[in-house]
Image (cartoon, grey):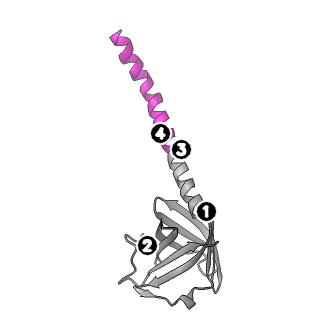
Amino acid sequence: MKYFQTTSARTNRPRLQKFVFLFAIVICSCSTENESKQLNGTWIPIKEEIGGTAFPESAFSDQRLIIEDENYTMRAENVDKGTVTLDGNKITIEGKEGPNAGRQIKAIYKIENEELTICYNLAGDIFPKTFSTEGNSMFFMATFKRAE
């Protein structure tokens, strides 16, 4: 009987490993999809800064960020469109149309108290480590509220 259990456990191990692997993929896909859905909508900037310097509200009062699944549209002085890829709290932004066409921008984001904060590295080489632009002229941060 002991031999049968050992053989059975050995035979079922690959099936169990496949199941665990597939389950992990489904969980990751769902969490990324849920994160994406959480970002969907129209967002209005309430604060913006670059290199530690805050912009006056008049500089961004007409801007709108629209996120629809993996697509974004930024309406400002020009219209910028592209795609976003999420990985945890990291966003890789690929510009497709407008002033950022052909550019890749790396950013991090968080949603707290009904506000979306995104810290962008405009150089596109690395993801920001913190939500701060202080001392880095290529880091831009914006805080948004959801449009009503």
Mark earlier in primary sequence (4, 3): 4
State the SS at label 1. loop
The first of marks 4 and 2 along the sequence is 4
Distance of mark 3 from mark 1, alpha carbons? Answer: 18 Å
In the foreground, 48 or 23: 48
Q: Are the two marked residues, 4 and 3, in contact with CB atoms closer than 8 angstroms? A: no
Q: Is residue 147 left or right of residue 110?
A: right
**Cα distance, mark 4 to mark 3?**
9 Å
Residue at the image point whose x is 57% and y is 70% from the top = 94
Q: Which residues are magenta?
A: 1-25
The amino acid type, in three-letter code, at marker 1 is: Glu
**Could you tell me the amino acid type at mark 2?**
Asp
Residue at x 39%, y 77% (from the top left corner): 132
Q: CA distance from mark 2 to mark 1?
A: 21 Å
User: Which label lies toward us, 4 or 2?
Assistant: 4
- Per the model, the C-alpha gap separating discs 1 and 4 is 25 Å
The quarter of the image holding the C terminus is bottom right
Nearer to us of marks 4 and 3 is 3
- For residue 126: magenta? no
Which numbered dot is residue 70? Answer: 1
Residue where numbered disc 2 is placed: 125
Rendering quarter of residue 33: bottom right
Q: Residues within 10 Å of mark 1 (few under 14, many from 20)?
A: some
User: How many labels, in total?
Assistant: 4
Q: Residues within 10 Å of mark 3 (few under 14, many from 20)?
A: few
Percent position (x, y) of residue 86? 52, 61
The image's mark for residue 21 is: 4
Question: How far from the left and from the top, in percent, is residue 24?
Answer: 48, 43
Question: Quadrant location of the N terminus?
Answer: top left
Mark 3 or mark 1: which comes first in sequence?
A: 3
